[in-house]
Amino acid sequence: MKKAIFSLKITALLSASLHAQQTEDKIYHYSSMDALRNGVYTGDITVKELKEKSDFGLGTYNFLDGELIQLDGQLFRVATDGSVETASEKRQVPFGSFTFFRKDQSIMAEQIKTVAELQQKLVHLLPSRNRFYAIKIEAGFENLTLGGAVKVSEKDTTGIATFMKTRPQYKKQNIRGTLVGFYSPPYVGGLDLSPFHFHFISDDKTAGGHLIDGTFSDTKITIQLDEKSNYEVILPHTNNEGYQRNWKTSEAKAQY
């Protein structure tokens, strides 16, 4: 029997035409960041299903069993030891943002040295801070720090903020690859990291993870933007008691 899935659609109405609202040019967001903050680490959607809904995205796998990066239709899994593999189509996902990336425009950032500087600059370069954006950046790095994930037990409902304190980190030097990311306005901070959430995958597909910090080797950085007027949220079909138990704790306000 097919499981019922709760779906919430958010449509950015500012300057959006009826035609834009009716297209499938949207962000497909599965679960919420607040769910991870409250220990919900299981989802129903599979890698195979995601391939039908997107070609670009990021997230994690059930029980935090690896970081997820989707680029050009391929879904990758970064294991705890930092190795990268093509994700099995049977793997399930408890959280992530996904879309079909269709570049609307490119903007150039100059005199940017660090990831922190890029994000500070990018907020001001966006056409609108009230819209959603899928962001693709192909760049080289002198140094790069990426974060991983460690699989938890099926009954563990510890909030993700606790695990992030001891998450594995991968240090890379002189590496090129792609930043796969999303901009989310502050008013949806409970759904995803705001303003930015980035994962990285190297050109040779041997390194990847959650973007923590880095120093660019490029003097000019081209940022590809795909503006989205529609944002669809799908909630997992789960009855995680830990989520209910932790909902009102300070953990819900912790930063991932």
Image (tube, rainbow, N blue to C red):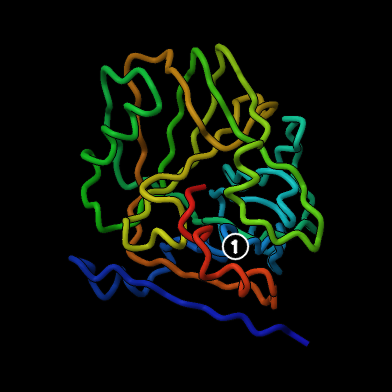
Outermost residue on the left side: it is: 15
Where does residue 104 sit, x and y in percent of width and height? 32, 47
Taking 224 as reference, is 87 above or below it?
A: below
Report the quarter where the N terminus lies. bottom right
Is 181 left or right of 36, judged from the image as shown?
left
Where does residue 139 sit, x and y in percent of width and height? 45, 23
Taking 174 as reference, is 59 above or below it?
A: below
- Name the residue tied to disc 1: 38
> At 73% across and 84% down in the image, what residue appears?
2
Which sits in the foreground, 10 or 148?
148
> At 65% across and 64% down in the image, what residue appears?
40
Taking 174 as reference, is 240 above or below it?
A: below
Is 189 left or right of 12, judged from the image as shown?
right
Q: Quadrant of residue 177?
A: top right
Q: Quadrant of residue 110?
A: top left
Where does residue 27 sit, x and y in percent of width and height? 45, 61
Which sits in the foreground, 126 or 238?
238
Which sits in the foreground, 27 or 157?
157
> At 79% across and 63% down in the image, what residue appears?
155
Where does residue 24 sit, x and y in percent of width and height? 44, 67
> At 60% across and 46% down in the image, what residue appears?
70
